[in-house]
Image (spheres, rainbow, N blue to C red):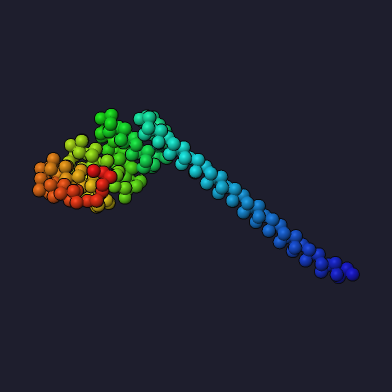
Amino acid sequence: MAFVTERAAPRLDNAKRSNRVAFIARIVGSAAALVIFFLAITWAARSGVISLLTVYAAKANQVAAANAALSLNASDPDAHFVRGAMLEAKADVGAAIVDYKQAIGARPNDYVLWLALARAQESNDDLAGAIASARQSVHLAPYYARPRWLLGNILVKAGQTDEGFRELRREQTTTDYCLR
C-alpha cells in the first residue's frame, strides 16, 4: 500500500502545480485586461476633454481654452488650428503661422490647414511661403475652388500675373459650388 500512495503523491503535486499555474495565468491576464481597459478609458476621457476645450475655444474665442487643450496634448492639430485662427484674428500672425505649421505637422494631408497657413503667410508678406503653401493646398484638393482662388490671388499679388490668372480661370471651372 505504501507503494500506491508514493506513486499517487507526485500526481497530486503535479495537478496542484498545474492548477496554480492556470490560476496565476488567469490573475495576470485579468490584471492586464484591467490595465488596458483603464488606459483606454483614460485616453478616451482625455481626448473628449481636449475636443470640448477646442470647441469651446473656437466658439468663445478664448485662447486660454486652446492653451488648456494643448497642455493636455501638445500635438493636437485641431487645437493648434483653432489657436492659430484666434491669434491671426488678433493680428499675431507670426504666432499663428507657428501654430498652423504645428497643426500641419500632425495632419499634413489636410488642405484646410495648408490654406490657412497660406493666408497667414500672405498677410505676413511671405509671398514665397504663401505660394508654396497654397500650391500644396491645391495639390491636396485639386477640384476645390477656394485653394485655386487663393493661389491665383497670391500669384497676382506676387507679380506672376499670367500664372495667377490661369489659376483663377481654373477656379471657375471647378465644381465646388459650396465655396462660391
Res 98 quadrant in image:
top left
Which residue is at a point 29% across and 47% down the rendered structure image? 111
Which residue is at a point 74% across and 64% down the rendered structure image? 14
Which residue is at a point 16% across and 47% down the rendered structure image? 168
From where the camera sits, is residue 136 visible?
A: no
From where the camera sits, is residue 5 visible?
A: yes
- Residue 135 screen position, x and y as percent: 21, 49
Res 23 quadrant in image:
bottom right
Q: Outermost residue, right direction?
A: 1
- Residue 15 screen position, x and y as percent: 75, 63
Would you say 31 lies left or right of 2 here? Answer: left
Which residue is at a point 50% across and 40% down the rendered structure image? 45
Q: Name above or below for residue 9 compared with residue 60.
A: below
Q: Name above or below for residue 12 compared with residue 172.
A: below
Q: Name above or below for residue 125 compared with residue 111.
A: above
Would you say 96 lies left or right of 35 here? Answer: left
Which quarter of the image is occupied by the N terminus? bottom right
- Residue 82 screen position, x and y as percent: 34, 36
Which quarter of the image is occupied by the C terminus? top left
- Residue 81 screen position, x and y as percent: 33, 39
Total labels drawn: 0
Task: Give whichever of 173, 158 is nearer the camera.
Answer: 173
